[in-house]
Image (cartoon, rainbow, N blue to C red):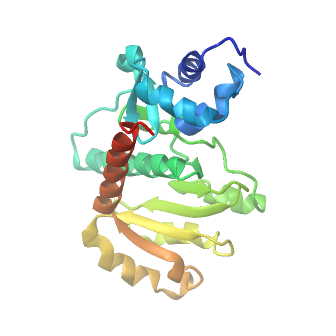
Amino acid sequence: MGNQQTTFSDAIEQVMLANGYYASLQLIYKEFVKYRPLTGKTPLKTIQERVQRDRRFTRIGLGVYALTEHLDKLPLAPKPQTVVEQRNYMHTRIQGMLIEIGNMDGFKTFTPDKSKVFDNKRLGNLVSLQRIPPFTYPRIVRSVRYIDVIWFNEQGFPERAFEVEDSTDFRRSLVKFTDLQYFNMTFHLIASAERKDKFEREVVRAAFSGIAKRCHFVSYDEIIQLYDARLRYQKARASLPF
């Protein structure tokens, strides 16, 4: 337990320093007690107030804040130059958005692509899980650990799985999902809108009958619009005095 003489802002700063100069609210909540006890009637609300109003912190994502004086130290991703690089860039952006949305919705988030950078943030520093919880047989855990993004509930069971499809025929992603067909969860394939017809042809194959009704196609634009809307809401909510 941390020192009660440490201020809330100082404790938040220490969490960010330990995480590469930025942190999600969920990580701050988790690590805060290493530097200061959670005191008061609504300590989590106090943390939110500090990151939103203390000028030493700057919002850099959905529920993600950085140390203002260290913004120049955040990781940079090279600008995409080729078609392949553009696909990889979009793939990472969608993964990052899904992770931040999942964090804000109270899920525990996982991705295997921890070194990728989304808007100056490494995905490994955004997720709340560095490894998949042992929620079932080891062979299944090993099989699904390569899914792009997974949201887990508080009990450590997967609730939603996401695969970002840049160019393949969806089959590989659907095969990954079949290993999770006996769990109460939904599956989401994210791709450009014009690929929806291809998804619909693949998902009805007999091999995927166990998950077909729980598989959903979502376009890149829909994820981006949702993420942007959540950012606007968070900004508007932070400006209110209650």
The quarter holding residue 4 reads: top right
In the rendered structure, the answer to whether residue 138 lies left or right of residue 196 reads right
Q: Residue at x 30, y 32 (%)?
A: 78
Residue nearer the viewer, 227 or 180: 227
Q: Quadrant of the N terminus?
A: top right
Rendering coords of residue 27 (x, y %): 59, 35
Q: Residue at x 60, y 73 (%)?
A: 178
Rendering coords of residue 60 (x, y %): 38, 33
Q: Is residue 86 above or below residue 116?
A: below
Q: Examine the rendering and report whether any part of residue 169 can be seen.
A: no
Q: Is residue 30 above or below residue 217?
A: above
Count the marks.
Answer: 0
Q: Residue at x 68, y 71 (%)?
A: 183
Q: Given the current orientation, which residue lies at the most extreme front position?
A: 241
Q: Residue at x 57, y 49 (%)?
A: 109
Rendering coords of residue 138 (x, y %): 76, 58
Rendering coords of residue 71 (x, y %): 37, 20
The quarter holding residue 151 reads: bottom right
Q: Is residue 41 above or below residue 68?
A: below
Q: Quadrant of the C terminus?
A: top left
In the rendered structure, the answer to whether residue 123 lies left or right of residue 76 reads right
Q: Examine the rendering and report whether any part of residue 90 can be seen.
A: yes
